[in-house]
Amino acid sequence: LWGMGLSEDNPDGPILKSLEVVQTCIDRNLSGKNWFVTKGAQAVAKDDVVSPWQSQVWGFGRTLQVENPRGFGGCIDLGPLADGNTSDIEMLAQELCRNSNETEIAFRQKVRLVGRLVNSLLSGKSKFSLKLNPDVSYLITGGLGALGLQIAEYLKNQGARHLVLAGRSGVSSETQRT
């Protein structure tokens, strides 16, 4: 629950303590799952106010999931207005005891929510309109790869005049040079 203590006034302490616990578990080959509980780290509803201090815990959790999956339980986000009432505590306790493979859970108004990808069929009526400012520069990280070059071409066709392409390996083909 240390992550819930992250704020502008206390931006690092809880996450560093969580890192120490994770490192100790790894160093001592302890079995068990690390769960991270946040308050307002994720926008689930359009009215949710997101705390960047809380959101960094989810970034830490996702990194742990990749680097040490057997030691990661998941991230649970209580609503930004959660006040530790009985229903929040009950839902949290039930989630921690649940036998589930879900690693990203949010509770809002006594409802358990999990992330899912869904197909979104775009109708012919809905056109995405990208408005670019021709007087500013646009940075494309990974811009020297195949996808980055396609994005650069698209932005150019949309009116961008100043593009900065950055990549780890540098320019290696004629396509990248032009």
Image (cartoon, helix red, strand yellow):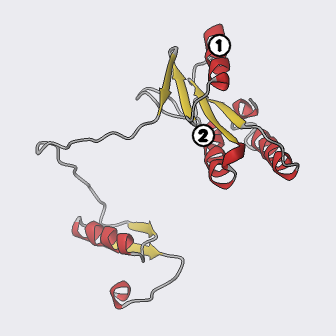
Question: Which residue is more in the foreground, 123 or 43?
Answer: 123
Check disc 1 and report the residue beneath it.
Answer: 90
Tally the numbered discs: 2
Q: Name the element at disc 1.
A: helix
Answer with left or right where residue 6 lies relative to residue 58: right
Label 2 vs label 1, nearer the camera = 1
Check disc 2 and report the residue beneath it.
Answer: 55
Q: Name the element at disc 2.
A: helix
The residues bearing labels 2 and 1 have C-alpha atoms spaced at a distance of 23 Å
Amino acid type at circle 1 is Glu
Assess disc 1: are there few (<14), some (14-19) or many (≥20) residues with their C-alpha within 10 Å of its C-alpha. few
Assess disc 2: are there few (<14), some (14-19) or many (≥20) residues with their C-alpha within 10 Å of its C-alpha. many
Residue at image position (78%, 47%) is 19
Amino acid type at circle 2 is Ser
Q: Position of residue 178 (x, y in %)?
A: 32, 87
Question: Which residue is more in the foreground, 94 or 171?
Answer: 94
Answer with left or right where residue 149 lies relative to residue 121: right
**Residue furthest left in the image:** 124
Residue at image position (50%, 15%) is 109
Q: Give residue 143's quadrant in the image.
A: bottom left
Q: Where is residue 161 in the image (x, y as percent from the top left)?
A: 30, 72
Q: Can residue 64 be seen in this view?
A: yes
